[in-house]
Amino acid sequence: MSRVAYVNGQYLRHRDAYVHIEDRGYQFADGIYEVCLVIDGSYWDYEGHMARMERSLNALHIRMPMGLAALKLVMQEVVKRNRLQNALVYMQVTRGVAKRNHAFPKNGATPALILTAQRFDLDQSDSQAERGVSVITVPDIRWRRVDIKTVGLLPNVLAKQAANEAGAAEAWQVRDGFVTEGSSSNAWIVNDKGVLITHPKTNDILGGITRETAIACAHDLQIKVEERPFTVEEAIRAAEAFITSATNLVMPVVEIDGQKVANGAPGPIAAKLRDAYKVRAKRG
């Protein structure tokens, strides 16, 4: 079956879906994106993703291309037309098409909106969580406003490629001796007292929606959370480590830079948090 995409008001076959060569997302990475997980028709963490989408657009002075209710209908239609039960819905908004010039278009531009959907295999993700994943560390070379979910992802791409070449699932980025986050996920460790530790929400990380839900789950489970930076050495000595994102949910990390975390197997706190996350995220 041919995949279907939404492009600026039209539902098109994936292979026929294009944007203009002077779209500012293509020319300047002048745009933002969001990814929402759909499981059995339920849009996980939906409100959080929509709120972050609005924050990112406001930070770049780009207006929402349509209201949230209309956008939800488009999301549902894209999932339906692709005949998916479990899916990752990708949404991208750019400033739109304008003559190439660094400054914003004087007369404004019509924001461009695209949506695509691809199959998500929850069973495969659960199977991976039972084994855990490995990460490597790389220097964090990103700009200082990574709290905005922009499409300017070249440093993240280079970090993820380094991980792929090393046979790892993710690259943890390190700035001034501290882990900030992964190339496409937030980074966590669990100390020997069972306390969860993750970098605080600053301009140096993208405040993950899954991260926020995981924190809420931890509070429900009466697990203490410390939002503070941690070093690579502290992570390697940790009792557990894991990453969070819409595509990973809560995913145990069992190896960092070739060194095992604890006994090299997923830990009980990450497993408990993953189960709790699945229940809570369904609420939207």
Image (cartoon, rainbow, N blue to C red):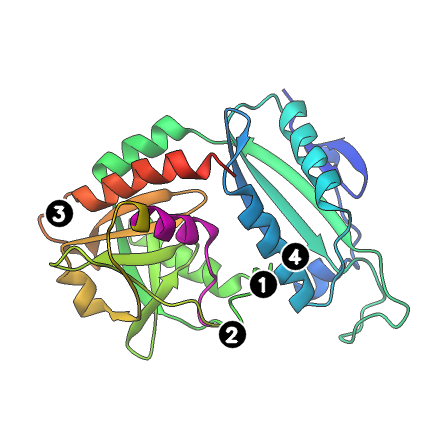
The kind of residue tagged 1 is: Gly
Residue at image x 31%, y 44%?
251
Read off the residue under disc 2. Answer: 143
Q: Label 3 vs label 2: CA separation? A: 33 Å
Q: Position of residue 214 (x, y in %)?
A: 36, 49
Magenta highlight on residue 153: no
Q: Taking 152 as reference, is 205 left or right?
A: left
Q: Label 3 vs label 4: CA separation? A: 40 Å
Q: Position of residue 48 (x, y in %)?
A: 54, 49
The kind of residue tagged 2 is: Trp
Q: Label 3 vs label 1: CA separation? A: 34 Å
The kind of residue tagged 3 is: Gly
Residue at image x 51%, y 67%?
146
Instruction: Check contact, mark 2 vs mark 1: CB within 8 A.
Output: yes
Q: Taking 222 as reference, is 19 left or right?
A: right
Residue at image x 61%, y 49%?
50
Q: Quadrant of the rendered structure where residue 122 is?
A: top left
Placement of 202 over or under 9, stated as above or below: below
First of labels 4, 2 by sequence position: 4
Q: Label 1 vs label 4: CA separation? A: 17 Å
Magenta segment boundaries in residue numbering: 204-218
Instruction: Check contact, mark 3 vs mark 1: CB within 8 A.
Output: no
Read off the residue under disc 1. Answer: 152
Placement of 151 over or under 179, stated as above or below: above
Q: Nearer the viewer, residue 50 or 35?
A: 50
Say which element carries label 3.
Answer: loop
